[in-house]
Image: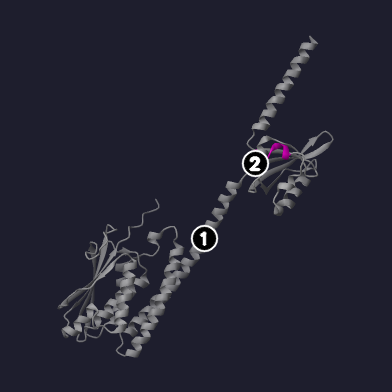
Amino acid sequence: MHTISRHQHLFGLEAHTCFYRSLLEQSPDAILLVDSAGVVRYANPSWGRMVERDFADLTGRSLLEIVHPDDVIIAAAAVDEACELYAKPRRVEFRCSRAHGEWRVLECICQPWQAVGEVMTAMFVRDISERHAERARYEQVQMLDSAAQVSGEIASDFSELLLLLGRHADVLAASGASDVRTEARNLRSTLDRGRIIVDQLHSFARIDDLDHRIAVDVNEVIAEAAGHFERLVRPGVEVTHLLGATAARVGMSRVALEQVLSALILHAGDTMTDGGRLTIATHDGAEIEQQEQPPTHSAYLVIDVTVSGIRTSLDSRSTISGGDAREDARHELRAATTLVQRAGGGIVVPASVGADTTIRIVLPVLPAKTSPN
């Protein structure tokens, strides 16, 4: 009877031993027993898979041999503290090398484990390399977002300054003195370089939304700059605005759009020595008929700059097409054409000039921003 009871007891102990051994061996986390000298006394199979080393090479050797040199002090301190009997569990992170040299970031919970006559450190280890990399990427994104926000604020402030300086340069360009026009052209060239920097800052400020990185409402710009445009023409020239475009949001900065319109107004104003009427109109339109490439946008906006009632000779009016324009006016027209083309549009200049002559700007319309909800 006692023999049967003893066998049942031994069988129960063996079953429990197999159960806990299986639990340790199949655990996804590594479990180590490390003595006060840092030598690994026990490691489950997960530790070998984690560091990709032979199981025989993991026990009987110091854990610190495979710890990153910069993390040795952290790992050693965690082992020393956990070897005290009543020490509290401590969480640490350190890097360990795999057999082929790759460094893995490990998260470890260290706590004391009392064996027969000895207190060792029980270490429960998990590989958090992917989590660590994701956290680093998140921190980098946060840093870039902060830098982008600052650059956007700087770009907005700088853009306002360029806008004011550009208006003064356009007024100087309308002067009759050639030396003043030359200085105005040089000033505009400098402002163009500043505008490129502003565009780059805006682009960086909205790296996640390139389609909307620089956008402006054409109708709003024309309405707000009406007084500025009137100062660019000669006395006796009436400037009117017909803002009929329903979708007026285009991919240009306010500075660039004002520069384009100012250049065309100055260019047309040279033909109106005896007065007339200059009309700036916007309306919805189709793509540019002269372009060789097929249209890439579904909607376009048209800006018409129309010169009416010109009471000068045909030779003077022909400057609209650029043939006889003064050098600074041709420079402004070329710069305006480049700005419009960068925005995906084009400028249509009439081949012949009549009593009512229109220079047309065609720009692709950006889609309306959708609500976050």
Per the image, is 260 magenta?
no
Helix, strand or loop status at disc 1: helix
Question: In the shown orientation, is residue 41 left or right of residue 24?
Answer: right
Q: Is residue 242 visible?
A: no
**For discs 2 and 1, the disc positioned in front in the rendered view:** 2
Residue 111 lies, in percent from the top left, at: 74, 41
* Magenta stretch contains residue 57: yes
Residue 165, how many percent across, how many down? 39, 79
Q: Residues within 10 Å of mark 1 (few under 14, many from 20)?
A: some
**Residue 24 higher or lower than 195, as above or below:** above
Work out whether residue 196 or residue 233 is closer to the camera in this orientation and state it: 196
> Which residue is outermost to the front?
100
> Which residue is depicted at the point 79% across and 36% down?
114
Residue under label 1, please give it.
144
Q: Which mark is residue 52?
A: 2
Q: As drawn, which residue projects farthest toward the right?
A: 117
Relative to 184, is 298 on the left or the right? left
The residue sitting at the left extreme is 355
Q: Residue at x 32, y 79 (%)?
A: 331
In this picture, is 348 found above or below 329? above
Q: Find the distance from the CA under tag 2 to the CA under tag 1.
A: 36 Å
Q: In which quadrant of the rendered image does the N terminus lie?
A: top right
Which range is magenta?
49-58
- Of 334 and 90, nearer the camera is 334
Q: Look at the picture and state if 94 lies above or below 170.
A: above
Ranked by sequence position, the earlier of labels 2 and 1 is 2
* Nearer-the-camera pick, 37 or 89: 37
176 to the left or right of 145: left
Amino acid bearing label 2: Glu
Which x, y percent locates residue 334?
Answer: 31, 76
Residue 268 in view in this figure:
yes
